[in-house]
């Protein structure tokens, strides 16, 4: 990648926000362990998955709003 190409900050911002969402991640991981041996296919962790990523998304959107002037090539 050339130095002048824009860089998508999505991964950086998501990683930066994950520590703030550790409770949601823990809940999701506990759910996954609980249902991993479900042979019926009826159990799932969709709610916990969305709770976790909603937390990350909320943090990222706040970060983009408050720091977009400091980052180069950020378009949120």
Image (cartoon, rainbow, N blue to C red):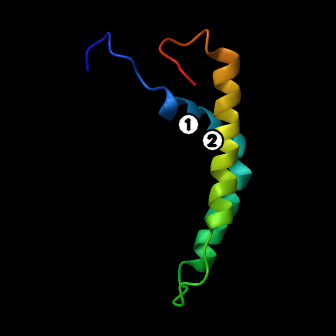
Q: CA distance from mark 2 to mark 1?
A: 5 Å
The image quadrant that residue 3 belongs to is top left
Q: Classify 10 Å Cα crowding around label 1: few (below 14), some (14-19), many (20 and above).
A: few
Q: Quadrant of the N terminus?
A: top left
In the rendered image, the quadrant that contains the C terminus is top right
In-front residue for pair 50/38: 50
Which residue is more in the foreground, 12 or 76?
76
Left/right of residue 10 with respect to residue 32 in the rendered view = left
Classify residue 24 by image quadrant: bottom right
Residue designated by label 2: 18
Residue bearing mark 1: 15
Q: Residue at x 57, y 36 (%)?
A: 14
Q: Residue at x 63, y 77 (%)?
A: 34
Pick out the residue farthest to the front: 75
Decide: marks 2, 1 in contact (CB < 8 A)?
yes
- Left or right, 62 with reference to 33: right
Query: Residue 5: percent from the left, percent from the top?
Result: 33, 15
Residue at figure coordinates x 53%, y 20% from the top left: 75
Image position, residue 56 (x, y; %):
65, 42
Residue placed at 70% from the left, 18% from the top? 66
**Position of 19 relative to 40 (above/below):** above
């Amino acid at each position: 990648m050339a130095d002048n190409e824009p860089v998508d900050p999505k991964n950086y911002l998501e990683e930066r926000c994950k520590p703030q969402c550790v409770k949601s991640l823990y809940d999701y991981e506990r759910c996954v362990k609980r249902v991993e041996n479900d042979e019926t296919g009826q159990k799932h962790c969709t709610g916990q998955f969305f709770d976790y990523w909603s937390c990350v998304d909320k943090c990222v959107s706040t970060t983009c709003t408050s720091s977009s002037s400091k980052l180069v090539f950020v378009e949120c």
